[in-house]
Image (tube, rainbow, N blue to C red):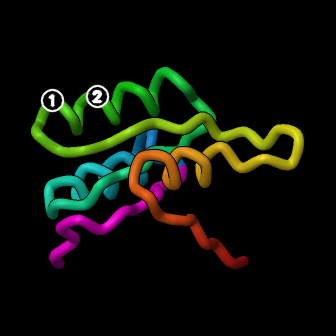
Amino acid sequence: MRLKDKVTLVTGAGSGFGAGIARLYASEGAKVVINDINDNAGQTVAQEIRQAGGEATYVMLTWRLGKNPANDTVRSRFWRTLRCAG
């Protein structure tokens, strides 16, 4: 799997499978946006990825005033628009 310069959003990435997938994607060269309901856990995983030489940022899992903070972060950091269906 080659993910160099791809942008990935991993939900539930503060622990367990989500954290493992985020680390794997980062190790394959992806820019990882971590999304989790637990702020501390999500920030910790993002920091661990950065310390290992990867690129990661954390986004809080909330929706306020009809705005999607994950989409705003992806757009501002990576110049891409997040598209999710389902």
The x, y position of residue 51, in whole percent, is 15, 29
Query: What kind of residue is marked 1?
Result: Gln
Residue sticking out furthest to the right: 65
Q: Quadrant of the C terminus?
A: bottom right
Q: What x and y, as percent, mark residue 20?
A: 30, 51
> Does 57 lie within the magenta span?
no
Q: How many marks?
A: 2
Which residue is tagged 1? 51
For residue 36, what is the image quadrant? top right
Give the image quarter of residue 15.
top left
Element type at mark 2: helix
Question: Measuring 49% from the left and 52% from the top, which residue is drawn there?
Answer: 74
The residue that appears at 86% across and 48% down in the rendered structure is 66
Instruction: Measure the C-alpha gap from mark 2 to mark 1.
Output: 6 Å
Q: In the image, is 62 to the left or to the right of 37?
A: right
Labels 2 and 1 touching (C-beta < 8 A): yes
- The picture places residue 38, in percent across and down from the top left corner, at 57, 29
Q: Which residue is mark 2?
A: 47
For the N terminus, the quadrant is bottom left
Magenta residues (range): 1-11
Task: Give the crowd class for mark 2: few <14, some 14-19, many >=20 residues within 10 Å.
Answer: some
Image disc number at residue 67: none
In the rendered view, tell whether residue 67 sits above or below residue 49. Answer: below
Picture residue at 61% right of the left edge, 72% below the top: 83
73 relative position to 79: left or right: right
Q: Foreground: 79 or 68? A: 79
Q: Position of residue 60 (x, y in %)?
A: 60, 35
* Vertical position of residue 86 compared to residue 67: above or below: below
- 86 vs 58, left or right, is right
Q: Amino acid at mark 2?
A: Gln
